[in-house]
Amino acid sequence: MTDNSVFPDPTYKDTVLAPLFEGVKTHYAGHMAAINRAHLVMLVETGILERTGGRKIAQALDAIDAETDVAALTYTGEHEDYFFYVEAELRRRLGDLGGALHTARSRNDMDHTLFKMALRTRAETMLAQITTLTDALINKARDEADTLIVAYTHGQPAQPTTFGHYLGAMIEVLNRDAQRLSAAIDNLGHCPMGAAAITTSGFPIDRTRMAALLGFEGPLVNSYGCIASVDYVTGLYSAIKLVFLHLGRVVQDLAFWSSFEVGQLYIPNSLVQISSIMPQKRNPVPIEHMRHLASVTCGRCDMVVNTMHNTPFTDMNDSEGEVQQSGYAAFESGGRVLALLTAFLPACSINTKNVRRNTDAASITITELADTLVRDEGLTFRQAHEVAADVACNLEGAPLSAGFETFQSAFQAAMGQQPGMDRRVFETATSPETFVARRDRIGGPAPAALDAALALYAQIVSAVQNESASRKQRIAEAETTRAAAYAQLLET
């Protein structure tokens, strides 16, 4: 039976090839040009391609770049993809010599190199946004080091702390997330070029030189793994997902704190929207946008990682063009969360009146009363806890600081005697300021402890920023080196 069909099938063209072609135009054309130039330099330097032919190919590549409006190209089906379009242009201009550029390489190693180059740029941008947010939070935490808040556990008022202390916890997680993302970016730093289809090449290629010309730390060693092991994708998107999973929990706290009933967080007018029918309402809508965008980002990361599930450990399209291009949306939505949160949190303030109200209503300093009974009255912890619990049960709506008589009765009932502490000591022990000041251990909310922690956090941010700057410098230096080597090729 004779198959008279012509590639590409129209439906395959419209549903697969044309969208992929558009994606390459948008995301990879510049990176492909860099790979072409670096590969050409390497071929000539190793003697695989003689210099005269290399110069002609270089001249043709420059002419193609100058004469081609990539954005205006439309997929016709004449060439399978953008790579073949460029090769066809070379062959149209140079004849058989135009096909020499593809010596000792494959679309396989090219594709994964393109993906890594595109991902490292986006990931470094996101990392910079994270460290910018963290810097802003460190400054905010210093400003709010003495600002009391109610800390909640299980949705209930628990203990007093400070806004700066809360932000410190958030900063610690962000720093760990930034370190995870930086490590994932490091895993983008080894170049697949030279793996060719999957087993390298019989030509005397220089993989180390190729990696250096493209700004990589070195070649990815195992050629099979260059094509099959897409952990650079799964690792990166897993690290990104954690950033927004964790931020989403903080954003949910902001929604809770800003509710009318809690009223702990005040959001300025520039970041609230008024109801179209209820003029009294101040809706903290940016919180909802940050929450859903964080969730969308997590979902987009899951899409990429889950697409790799149960795929064969070899070259396969499941990890390539379409999933890569779809995954870039995670950087877009995640970037919006980071930008909005960087503007939002520093602009907010704590409603100290409502904090005091909730502190009094929930007796949240009573842990320190129990601790004081252990230290000053000689009670065991359990005895002190039972006395404090009895006080809390019998305040009848009065603030704890006004409950000295209630405390005396509870102590007398439990211990058969009056306490040694007087009203002044009781009021000091039950004040939120005292509660915070006495929590001066490592990681606590007391000013000195918090200040030391914030200094450490700033050092971590600086270290992550230095790692990123070093990677960016390596790429910038590679661009300069590649351009000089390519220019020298044109001149010979």
Image (cartoon, rainbow, N blue to C red):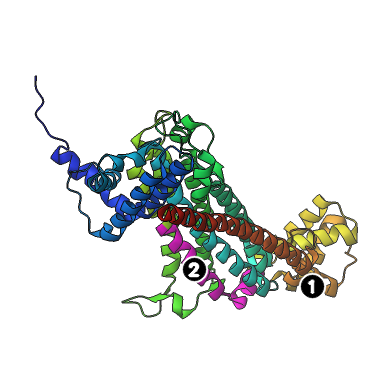
Specify the principal SS of the magenta part: helix
The location of residue 475, given as percent across then percent down, is 52, 55
Q: In terms of depth relative to the viewer, which is nearer, 342 or 488? A: 488
Tally of numbered tags: 2
Q: On the rendered image, what quadrant is the N terminus found in?
A: top left
Q: Residues in magenta? A: 332-360
* Residue 297 counted in the magenta span: no
Residue at 23% from the left image edge and 41% from the top image edge: 80
Q: Can residue 377 be seen in this view?
A: yes
Q: What residue type is labelled 1?
A: Glu
Q: In terms of depth relative to the viewer, which is nearer, 456 or 82? A: 82
Residue at 86% from the left image edge and 51% from the top image edge: 380
Q: Name the residue under label 2.
A: 259
Q: In this view, does 174 lie to the left or right of 337?
A: right
Q: In which quarter of the image is residue 311?
A: top left
Residue at 62% from the left image edge and 76% from the top image edge: 352
* Viewer-nearest of discs 1 and 2: 2
Q: In this view, does 95 lie to the left or right of 383?
A: left
Give SS at disc 1: helix
Q: Mark 1 points at which residue?
A: 427
Q: In which quarter of the image is residue 195?
A: top left
